[in-house]
């Protein structure tokens, strides 16, 4: 039984990793020129939460190193998509907020990826997607709790 369970686990994660790679490839092709998935993800998060975040908080949210997040934020700041300011309570820290240009870029990205996502969901069927979401959320929660 353990061998069968192990094979099932390997198959599950192989499918998830392959789907992730394929999705990232397709999204990269339809995102606005110069925008990477990491850029879109940060802009989308900041737009959704509507609150400033520190680079450390963003790194934790996205499960990346602080260095990787600093690189992403530097590129977003250079493009004018985020504002980075000192934390008034602790000058050693910084706070990040989405700019009006960043909100427009995020909205443009949403417009460009929505047809692709709608096509995939349409091909699978809404019922299958709704059924898969609780399982994927539970899997994500399990992985986050062990991180």
Image: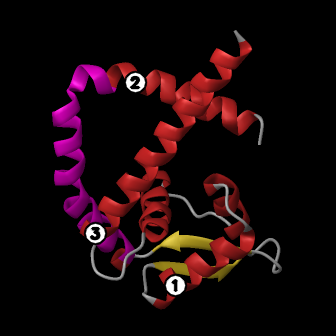
The one of 76 and 38 positioned closer to us in this rendering: 38
Left or right: 144 with respect to 76? right
Left or right: 48 with respect to 128? right
Measure the C-alpha gap from mark 1 to mark 3: 19 Å
The one of 83 and 88 positioned closer to us in this rendering: 83
Quadrant in which residue 138 is drawn: top right
Measure the C-alpha gap from mark 1 to mark 2: 35 Å
- Sequence-wise, which precedes: disc 1 or disc 2? 1
Quadrant in which residue 72 is drawn: bottom right
Who's the residue at 22% across and 26% down the image? 126
Q: Quadrant of the N terminus?
A: top right
Quadrant in which residue 106 is drawn: bottom left
What mark, if any, has residue 132 been given in the picture?
A: 2
Magenta span includes 135: no
Element at label 3: helix
Q: In which quarter of the image is the C terminus?
A: top right
Report the label total.
Answer: 3
- Residue 25's place in the image compared with 101, above or below, is above
Q: Mark 3 points at which residue?
A: 29
Element at label 1: helix
- Residue 11's place in the image compared with 76, above or below, is above
Residue located farthest toward the top when viewing the structure as drawn: 1
The magenta region covers 102-129
């Amino acid at each position: 039984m353990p061998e069968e369970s192990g094979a099932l686990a390997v198959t599950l994660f192989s499918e998830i990793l392959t789907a992730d790679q394929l999705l990232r490839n397709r999204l990269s092709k339809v995102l606005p020129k110069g925008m990477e998935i990491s850029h879109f993800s940060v802009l989308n998060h900041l737009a959704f939460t509507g609150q400033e975040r520190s680079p450390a908080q963003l790194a934790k949210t996205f499960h990346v190193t602080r260095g990787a997040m600093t690189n992403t934020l530097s590129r977003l700041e250079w493009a004018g998509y985020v504002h980075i300011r000192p934390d008034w309570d602790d000058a050693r820290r910084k706070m990040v907020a989405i700019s009006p240009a960043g909100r427009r870029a995020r909205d443009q990205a949403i417009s460009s990826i929505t047809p692709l996502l709608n096509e995939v969901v349409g091909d699978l069927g809404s019922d299958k997607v709704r059924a898969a979401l609780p399982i994927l959320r539970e899997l994500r929660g399990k992985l986050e709790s062990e991180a």
